[in-house]
Amino acid sequence: MFGEILENVRRSCPLIHNITNYVTVNDVANAILACGASPVMSDEPDDVSDITSICAGLNINIGTLNKMSIEAMHIAGMRAKELGHVVLLDPVGAGASRLRTETASDIVRKIHPDIIRGNISEIKTLSLGGGSTMGVDADAADAVTEENLDEMVRVAKAYSASSGAVIAITGAIDLVADSEKCYVIRNGRPEMSRITGTGCQLSGITTAFAAANRDNMTEAVAAAVAMMGLAGETGVGNLKDGEGNSTLRNRIIDAIYNMDADTLDKGARYEIR
Amino acid sequence: MFGEILENVRRSCPLIHNITNYVTVNDVANAILACGASPVMSDEPDDVSDITSICAGLNINIGTLNKMSIEAMHIAGMRAKELGHVVLLDPVGAGASRLRTETASDIVRKIHPDIIRGNISEIKTLSLGGGSTMGVDADAADAVTEENLDEMVRVAKAYSASSGAVIAITGAIDLVADSEKCYVIRNGRPEMSRITGTGCQLSGITTAFAAANRDNMTEAVAAAVAMMGLAGETGVGNLKDGEGNSTLRNRIIDAIYNMDADTLDKGARYEIR
Amino acid sequence: MFGEILENVRRSCPLIHNITNYVTVNDVANAILACGASPVMSDEPDDVSDITSICAGLNINIGTLNKMSIEAMHIAGMRAKELGHVVLLDPVGAGASRLRTETASDIVRKIHPDIIRGNISEIKTLSLGGGSTMGVDADAADAVTEENLDEMVRVAKAYSASSGAVIAITGAIDLVADSEKCYVIRNGRPEMSRITGTGCQLSGITTAFAAANRDNMTEAVAAAVAMMGLAGETGVGNLKDGEGNSTLRNRIIDAIYNMDADTLDKGARYEIR
């Protein structure tokens, strides 16, 4: 089923508007292209309404937010929702600064994103008002583990119910939840955390997957998360002696480029709770 | 002849000032270095006049324009023209938003760039007031094809005559025109459109080629366009099993780095109309 | 001894706040991850005080400075010093524009960075009020050579004494000086100058090395400089036929990722003057 979701992306090639950080933006663009969609970036308040109008989805990432881009996020978000586009929020660093926490909370409250994707610390900050974000990475103390899995599944479903968004919590174990069901996904490799931007790339790809599969959004998000993890496995598997995180970055995007429906269906490892 | 143009770049190593988007800026810098020139980036209005003064060429790319950078484009553009430097405009997304169309038109009218390089949709928007830009990519309906080639050559020459700039329209078939002649270039590979930034890289390189070949500007632009296409062919040819768009990005810049005059002369495929 | 310094980074994994340019920021983040530390980027004045507070070091790079980021540099710098964090200044392009020279001088005077790392033209500009910066690269006329080495060592020590910072001057020969001693380091390869950002990466890494070795700062800076040069040697050594500057960029970061204490201790080539 995940394979069909990927094929829908390749068939419809949705144009995705990204208001995202300048650290990983190039990788986000190439990852979106790799999965078969098209990216456009714009964060000027006077430009974003026109740009988002010709797109199918909007990916809002607060990784290097500033006053100008925050204004643009709200303008683009309102316009995208008005037009019925998919809107995703990636609350990078929520919990690490007052501005990030408030900006993310504001966007959830005013824009009502269809999807919120973050690490466990960011999601706990938004859903519980807690969590101990270490910069832009989750605090180790916050990890989703086999031990706290039932509780974390409950947190994800409850936050989906209260926010109205599909919730994706990514880490060693990934969770994708709506109010009723939660995909527990076990793809991925720890080496992915030694590259900057795999989370940002996933947010861009997820927006594309959801835009191309509007009637099946929770599963589309789960498919994107599983595909990113599987691409990480392929990427690590293809590393040669002497290669490290910079080459791995390329190999993961390459693996997305070469992913097909069958590989995704066979490689995805998940259960539904 | 194109080979000699490349050797002039390597010999004079022109310093190129880039006001460009933050999506592909790193690749633009490395592509400029690969072809033998040097890049410097600055988009702060209070900084650009000093910076452009020590350069030989200015590359203006509106890919992620904002109010601050638009002001900087005008300040730098005026100063660069005053000093007789080469100025190139890459009107990314002209036609996709009012702000982009107006900004590009303003720069053409007030700065009089020496070169305008875009896809067919962007150039049609600027020259005819039409074109149907899809985000930052050309609309398929706008492609230069063998069928409409004569008409497109006329459009390019006419826009060169009215704007006073060398016009480069890049896509499956590339056109480089002044008011009297048009290079029709058939290098390149379709896989290049699956990487972000080959157009932006080309704009940086083209500025360097023109700056090092001031007396032969149309041919210098044609040489840059052919070299980029040829590097794409080499890059795709060097791809191994399992590699995709991210590795291709590296291989194209590597191919520029390793390009020599002889390879360029032998590999360039073009006619003059 | 340099190896132990690297191991301290890997053991303590310091979080480094970077206010840096958008050209090389992705490579800076991946290089910091490669050496075993963690990066976070933020340049919004309302965000940086919170972000820098949870970090161990602050890397200020003025490569694409603007009015907003300059304000953020001062806010973050003051806060980081207040908290006793390591602060590094990379005065990119000082000497190339009035704004860059003044901004760098202001930061030295008001923030008192613990480390200043630049090319010889930038350091001469700051220390002597001279130097002839060509854009963001050192002027060839300014190089540290075997002929002027004694004089340059004196300049570095004197500037360390007057500024209170450890001074790192990088180029074909690298100097790392405090007021009493100067490491003269001969690692590195000329091909590194054909990639954008090796200097910026080094500044990020140096901040991490210093943050993890507070009681041994001059040596920590020297270790970072030697490691970057050694990674360049490994990277160039691993290049295959047809590969160029873009692949080299990846191979250098990969070499940092795979660097171990023993390799660094054996590969570092330096003397103390």
Image (tube, coloured by chain):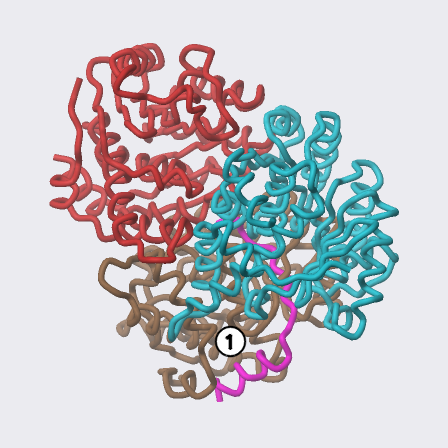
Chain colours: A cyan, B red, C brown
Q: Left or right? Give the position of B130 relative to C60.
A: left
Residue B211 image position (x, y, % from top left): 28, 35
Q: Left or right? Give the position of B204 relative to A106.
A: left
Protein chain holding label 1: C
Magenta stretch holds residue C12? yes
Q: Image point 52% across, 65% down: which residue? A: A233
Indicate the quadrant where residue B139 lies.
Answer: top left
Q: Is residue C49 above or below residue B84?
A: below
Q: Is residue A66 above or below residue C91?
A: above
Q: Image point 54% across, 67% down: which residue? A: C32
What SS does tag 1 mark?
Answer: helix
- The 10 Å Cα crowd at callout 1, few under 14, some 14 to 19, many 20 or more, is many
Q: Which residues are magenta?
A: C1-23
Looking at the rendering, in which quadrant would you find the C terminus of chain C? bottom left
According to the image, label 1 marks what residue? C221
Task: Say which amino acid is labelled 1.
Answer: Val
Q: Does the rendering let one see residue B49?
A: yes
Q: Does the rendering let one see residue A136?
A: no
